[in-house]
Image (spheres, rainbow, N blue to C red):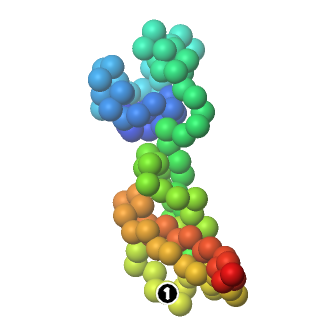
Amino acid sequence: MITRRQAAQILDIPLEMAIRHGIPPRMEDAELARLQADPPGWLLQSRANRTGKRPVWVELSCTVCGYTETARPKKWWPEFTFLACEDHSVRELPALPDGAVRSEYPGVGSRFIGVVDSAVSPAD
């Protein structure tokens, strides 16, 4: 048995689409295999409309402890240098490279802070 969320991840569709098209809260692996082998029209259309620019799902992983989760990426997420769980101390994070500045973005996934380390350009 898999959950609707797991089915959406495997089918590479948003959870909202899975609900809208009647994917049940729990389903057998064989039922999901049938959906993949003989996709309904809505799933074929969804795949045809994909531009490949933004993934539907991404795997988030903490650099410090390795905790992972799958989440829908948000438009405001920059390209993170790394992710860390919110409860890790600053001392546990990777060292800031020389000549760089660190920006933190809380609220990534259910428990992460996204970190971007950017090189500081010399003043003209």
Position in image of residue 112 (x %, y %): 43, 66
For the point 41% across and 74% down, the residue is 86
Q: Height in image: 72 above or below 53?
A: below
For the point 41% across and 34% down, the residue is 14
Would you say 121 lies left or right of 11 here? right
Position in image of residue 89 (x %, y %): 46, 86
| Residue 108 in view, yes or no | yes
Would you say 20 lies left or right of 5 here? left
Quadrant that contains the N terminus:
top left
Q: Height in image: 56 above or below 33?
A: below
Q: Height in image: 99 above or below 34?
A: below
**Residue extending furthest front?**
124
Closer to the camera in the image, 23 or 122: 122
**Residue extending furthest bottom?**
91
For the point 36% across and 27% down, the residue is 18
Position in image of residue 83 (x %, y %): 53, 67
Label 1 crowd bin: few (<14), some (14–19), many (20+), radius 10 Å: few
For the point 55% across and 79% down, the residue is 102
Label 1 SS: helix
Q: How many marks?
A: 1
Amino acid type of the residue that numbered disc 1 sits on in the rendered structure: Val
Q: Which residue is mark 1?
A: 90
| Residue 36 in view, yes or no | no
Position in image of residue 57 (x %, y %): 50, 42
Quadrant that contains the C terminus:
bottom right
